[in-house]
């Protein structure tokens, strides 16, 4: 990929307090209406014209822009690899990273990056907007300026944030715990199963107990392989036997995120349980994740979920679907042994689920 690199002229002198790399991937943040009346991403040059405030920051700011900014509905694992690689390559030169990304799949990208990058000891902050920067009521300006402040914040000389986060609408959230749950208010994201990491009011109040601690000896490493032979199978009453069978018989299928009811319950019809058994016997990984945003899978709590563990279904605990599907793609892509994939799915890789 040929990136466009732009150094933003700021008031920061030769020795700025912090240097931040902004990675512009697209999203509503930098969109405008095209001739047909639909919102489409535009290039970062035009984004900059809309935020003259950036030049007043005491930061060294560099922007790397995707050559073709994406609506995040088009983002896939190739983009995650590009993003991870940009951060990995530039890691030593910057104090923090801000990724401008569409909100639709931001939680997936943040989760994927949190699994690809090991040994993070600097802030990597995703943000975006619900209304484009060029519009008078846009949330883009506040989201970016505060994300930059968080990405450059230090305490006792070390970064406060040492993980992949989403900053949106005055709250900082753990990336791999986040979900986009609202599309028409500014408060688009929540982490139902994890406390908020910070709230931006007049001051930015950090929830220190919830943050990943800084490890001065951490060394960044990257793994860049995803296996996309996975599916999310969301249960609903009356789901059709033929449909379930044909999904589980998909050629090359390696993993299923089974979106179940409540605390991990499924129907216990014999045909359904037989389908799961057959899939598990073929080596397809079955991962139980709840349709509820809050709470966790507890297999065996109800009779309807008791048999699932015997059939080889693994509990996703309190993981989100976004983290579950990216984690499964990542583990199937990077681990050779199925047993290791299965073990790692049931424990946190990087704060995405409770023990
Ligand atoms: N469709 C847009 C995107 O995800 C929505 C947004 O950015 O809010 O790229």
Image (tube, rainbow, N blue to C red):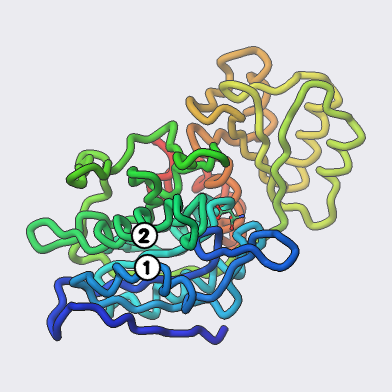
The residue closer to the viewer here, 226 or 2, is 2
Can residue 271 be seen from the camera position used here?
yes
179 vs 29, nearest the viewer: 29
Please identify the quadrant where the N terminus is shown: bottom right
**Contact? badges 1 and 2 (CB < 8 Å):** yes
Q: Quick one: SS at disc 1? A: loop
Residue at point 54%, 86% (across, down): 2
Q: Position of residue 158 (x, y in %)?
A: 15, 62
Residue pushed farthest top? Answer: 303
Within 10 Å of disc 2 (Cα), the crowding (few <14, some 14-19, many 20+) is many
Q: Indicate whether 290 appears above or below 302.
A: below
**Label drawn at residue 144:** 2
Q: Secondary structure at mark 2?
A: helix
Q: Residues within 10 Å of mark 1 (few under 14, many from 20)?
A: some
Residue farthest along the front direction in this orientation: 136
Report how many numbered discs are placed on residues in the image. Answer: 2
- The image shows residue 283, relative to residue 95, as above or below, that is above
């Amino acid at each position: 990929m040929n990136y466009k690199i732009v150094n933003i002229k700021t008031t920061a002198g030769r020795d700025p307090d912090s240097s931040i790399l902004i990675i512009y991937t697209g999203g509503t943040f930098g969109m405008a209406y095209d001739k047909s009346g639909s919102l489409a991403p535009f290039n970062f040059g035009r984004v900059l014209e809309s935020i003259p405030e950036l030049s007043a920051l005491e930061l060294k700011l560099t922007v790397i822009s995707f050559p073709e900014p994406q609506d995040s509905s088009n983002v896939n694992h190739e983009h995650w690899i590009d993003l991870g690689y940009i951060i990995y390559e530039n890691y030593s030169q910057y104090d923090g990273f801000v990724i401008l990304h569409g909100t639709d799949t931001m939680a997936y990208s943040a989760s994927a990056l949190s699994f690809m990058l090991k040994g993070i000891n600097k802030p990597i902050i995703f943000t975006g907007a619900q209304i484009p920067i060029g519009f008078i009521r846009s949330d883009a300006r506040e989201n970016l300026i505060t994300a930059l402040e968080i990405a450059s914040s230090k305490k006792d000389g070390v970064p406060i944030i040492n993980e992949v986060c989403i900053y949106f609408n005055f709250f900082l959230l753990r990336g791999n715990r986040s979900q986009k749950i609202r599309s028409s208010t500014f408060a688009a994201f929540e982490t139902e199963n994890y406390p908020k990491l910070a709230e931006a009011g007049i001051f930015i109040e950090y929830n220190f107990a919830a943050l990943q601690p800084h490890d001065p000896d951490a060394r960044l490493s990257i793994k860049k392989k995803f296996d996309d032979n996975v599916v999310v199978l969301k249960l609903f009453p009356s789901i059709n036997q033929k449909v379930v069978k044909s999904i589980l018989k998909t050629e090359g299928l390696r993993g299923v995120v089974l979106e179940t009811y409540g605390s991990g319950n499924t129907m216990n019809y014999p045909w359904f349980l037989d389908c799961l058994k057959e899939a598990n016997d073929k080596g397809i990984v079955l991962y139980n994740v709840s349709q509820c945003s809050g709470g966790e899978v507890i297999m065996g709590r109800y009779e309807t979920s008791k048999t699932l563990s015997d059939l080889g279904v693994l509990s996703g605990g309190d993981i989100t679907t976004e983290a579950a599907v990216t984690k499964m793609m990542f583990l199937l892509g990077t681990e050779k042994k199925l047993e290791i994939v299965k073990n790692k799915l049931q424990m946190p890789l990087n704060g995405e689920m409770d023990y």
